[in-house]
Image (cartoon, rainbow, N blue to C red):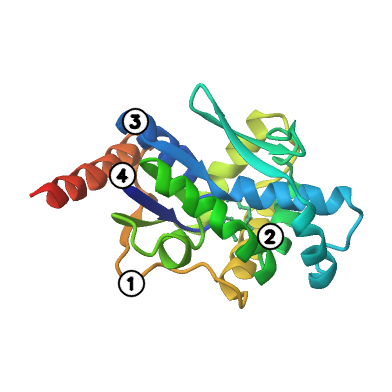
Amino acid sequence: MSYFSVAVDGPAGAGKSTLARAAAERLGFVYVDTGAIYRTVGLAVKRAGIDRQDASAVAALLPGLSISIRYADGVQHMLLDGEDVSGLIRTPEMSEYASSVSALPAVRAFLMEMQRQMAREHDVIMDGRDIGTVVLPDAGLKVFLTASPEKRAMRRFKELTEKGTAVTYEEVLADMNARDEKDTTRAAAPLRAAEDAVLLDTSDLTLEESVDALEGLIRQRMKEGQA
Ligand code: DC
């Protein structure tokens, strides 16, 4: 039996995880958040006391790492050495660590098989930066999700202030622009749309409209595949 894969790539704050998770729920697909896997490597590097930009020290750590994904009630959990670190990896510091380690080719190669394995075993919606270009080049559908930097920063700002984090909109926007710059200009698997990706710009769409659009694209492509 073969499975259907959807690759969702795009910059930070485009709403990839929210939309991919919601569409996966509607379609009965498994949602795979690959950023969480990079974040978990970031946490392991921090715990090991290694400089996160030291490529050879990070590469030496990888073979001994025990990282796995578990699903509980459809929610993805990250395990590091058996410990559920799903909450610990959601800090701004871990965003920085993830961004640094994700620029290292050894880290990307190490995580590739784990991601591909998920797509071999389930219908998946996988979100990340290089899913359509590198991880799943044969995905049934590739979506490049984007929104203007201002819209993305405003959404992230609201999310953070609702959680009680003290930040200004300007800080969030600057942080987002810096991370975009780093993710798009790195040598290893930089963020870019696959040539055959469908562009979905959610700047002027509500959350509901965005999920509808993503679900519609997937259903249409699956129907075309069966025709
Ligand atoms: O999506 P996120 O914010 O959780 O991702 C954290 C970092 O990991 C981000 O800086 C980009 C990187 N990343 C990546 O390089 N490739 C992926 N497939 C997913 C995330």
Dot placed on the residue nearer the N-terminal end, 4 or 2: 2
Q: Circles 1 and 3: CB distance less than 8 Å?
A: no
In the image, which disc is placed on residue 99? 2
Q: Kindly identify the amino acid type of the residue bearing the numbered disc 4.
A: Leu
Q: Circles 4 and 3: CB distance less than 8 Å?
A: no
Residue at 73% x, 52% y is: 41
Gap in Å between the C-alphas at discs 4 and 2? Answer: 26 Å
Q: Kindly identify the amino acid type of the residue bearing the numbered disc 2.
A: Ser
Q: Quadrant location of the N terminus?
A: top left
Q: Nearer the viewer, mark 1 or mark 3?
A: 3
In the image, which disc is placed on residue 28? 3
Q: Is residue 31 above or below residue 61?
A: above
Q: Report the residue marked by disc 4.
A: 214
Mark 2 surroundings: few (<14), some (14-19) or many (≥20) residues within 10 A: many
In the image, which disc is placed on residue 54? none
The residue positioned farthest toward the bottom in the image shown: 187
Q: Is residue 99 above or below residue 82?
A: below
Residue 55 at x, y = what percent?
79, 71
Gap in Å between the C-alphas at discs 4 and 3? Answer: 14 Å
The answer to whether the residue bearing label 2 lies less than 8 angstroms from the nearest atom of ligand 1 is: yes
Dot placed on the residue nearer the N-terminal end, 1 or 3: 3
Q: Report the residue marked by disc 1.
A: 195
Disc 1 secondary structure class: loop
**Number of labelled discs?**
4
Residue 31 location, quadrant: top left
